Image: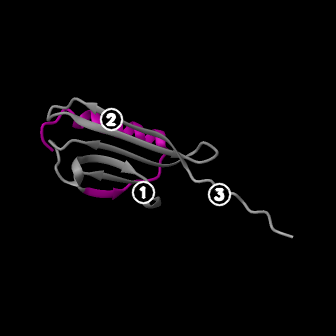
Amino acid sequence: MHAARKTVRKPVKVTDEAAVIRCAAGDGLVREEVWKDAEGKVVRYNLAFINLSLFAGDRGRVLGYDTAHGQLHRHFAGKVEAVAASTYEQILERFLSEVEQLRRRKTL
């Protein structure tokens, strides 16, 4: 008799979007990638604000939040710091607020 095999489903990418936004330093790009599990819970994400006029390092990623390597962390001008766990919606709101402030700047 065989034991029942539990099917493990990989998270599914449900959002993969990019938008060009006007910035004081020159146009930037906002990227959002989101993966959900079978129950619809966000299990992985990547948010990035890219603007080579503000920051040339890290392929232009001025600001980012992601859950790569199983831990939420924030990227800012080449530096990485851990962030206390929060819901995706709260992190998205924080990210968009920071992007709004950054897009008004001509330098970091």
- Camera-nearest residue between 108 and 41: 41
Q: CA distance from mark 3 to mark 1?
A: 20 Å
Q: Mark 1 or mark 2, which is nearer the start of the sequence?
A: 1
Q: Which residues are magenta?
A: 79-108
**Label drawn at residue 97:** 2
Distance Cα–Cα, label 2 vs label 3: 36 Å
Work out whether mark 2 precedes mark 3 in sequence or the reverse, and give the earlier one.
3
State which mark lies toward you, 2 or 1: 1
Residue 104 placement: quadrant: top left
Q: Residue at x 19, y 53 (%)?
A: 57
**Residue type, numbered disc 3:** Val
Q: Residue at x 15, y 31 (%)?
A: 24
Q: Are marks 2 and 3 in contact (CB under 8 Å)?
A: no
Location of mark 1 (residue)? 68
- Residue 8, label in figure: 3
Q: Is residue 101 left or right of residue 67?
A: left
Q: Determine whether, in the image, residue 76 is placed left or right of residue 15.
A: left
Mark in front: 2 vs 3 = 3
Which kind of residue does numbered mark 1 sit on? Ala
Image point 16% across, 36% down: which residue? 105
Under tag 2, what secondary structure?
helix
